[in-house]
Each structure stands twice: as C-alpha cells, then as structure tokens.
Image (cartoon, rainbow, N blue to C red):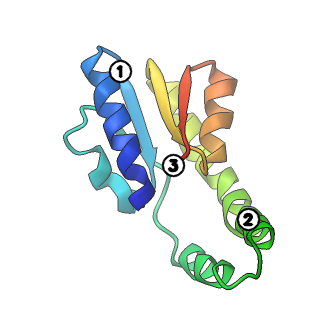
Amino acid sequence: HDHAAPLSRLASELVLRGYRVSFAIQEGGAHYTEGTGAQFVSLGPDIAEQRSKLSNISLESGVLNGLLALVDGVYLPMSVPMFRALNATVLRDPPDIMVIDAAAVAGIDVAQLLQVPYVINCP
C-alpha cells in the first residue's frame, strides 16, 4: 500500500478545497485515509493470496512479462469483487470526486458508470 501515500495527499487537498471525497482502498490500507477528511470506503479485505502472487510476479523475467502477469493474476481477478463493493457504496452516497489508484480498475468503472468525476493516481 505504500503507493497510496500520494493518494492521501491528493484526497487531503481536495477536501481542503471543499470537495466531498471518498477514498476507496482495501481494509489494510484504511490508515491512509486518517487525517485526510475523506470518507474511507472498503474495497474488501486484503487477500493473502494476492500477496503471494505479487511475490511470484516479481520473479518474472522482463518488464512486459511481469506486467502481463500482474494484470492477469492480480488486477483482473480482484476487479469484480471490488466493483460490487464500491458500486453499492457510491450508489448510496456519491462523493463529489473519486481519487482512484490506477490499479483499481473497478474504481474507474464505477466512476464512469455513475458519472462521478475522478482523478487517477499513477505513481
């Protein structure tokens, strides 16, 4: 979750500018929302299986092979459960803007489906 630190700063700045911001991240990253003023939205529990897949992916030879393994092995399988959780939450209480990690494909899908403006973080 270390890549979420820039998302925290971005969420804080948007809140300071008067926006209602939802910060969607897996439960293990909830601490990134603390002090931002943004509403924490759970993308579900951290999945130990995903961490082991990430370790295996880091052993892939070549950047392209590693990227493809990451998308196929981690991002796409997590998208449907994330989409369901996030869609339900955003439907109940839509924010003014969503701050989305580039890896959270489901966040982009929900924002576009519900026509909520969004910013993508890609550190």
Among numbered discs 1 and 3, the one appearing first in the sequence:
1
State how far apart marks 1 and 3 are (Cα): 23 Å
Quarter where residue 67 is shown: bottom right
Residue shown at 19% from the left, 40% from the top: 35
In this view, the residue farthest toward the left is 35
State how far apart marks 3 and 2 are (Cα): 15 Å
Q: Verify CB contact (< 8 Å) between mark 3 and mark 2.
A: no
Q: Which residue is mark 2?
A: 67
Residue shown at 63% from the left, 18% from the top: 115
Instruction: For the N terminus, give its image quadrant.
Output: bottom left
Q: Which residue is mark 1?
A: 20
Residue shown at 39% from the left, 44% from the top: 6
Residue shown at 35% from the left, 21% from the top: 20
**Image position, residue 106 (x, y; %):** 64, 44
Count of marks overlaid on the render:
3
State how far apart marks 1 and 2 are (Cα): 33 Å
Q: Verify CB contact (< 8 Å) between mark 1 and mark 2.
A: no
Q: Verify CB contact (< 8 Å) between mark 1 and mark 3.
A: no
**Image position, residue 118 (x, y; %):** 55, 26
Q: Which residue is mark 3?
A: 123
Crowding around mark 2 (Cα neighbors within 10 Å: few <14, some 14 to 19, many 20+) is: some
Near-viewer residue (13 or 29): 13
Secondary structure at badge 2 equals helix
Secondary structure at badge 1 equals loop
Q: Nearer the viewer, mark 1 or mark 3?
A: 3
Crowding around mark 1 (Cα neighbors within 10 Å: few <14, some 14 to 19, many 20+) is: some
* 53 relative to 90 in the view: left or right: right
Residue type at mark 1 is Arg
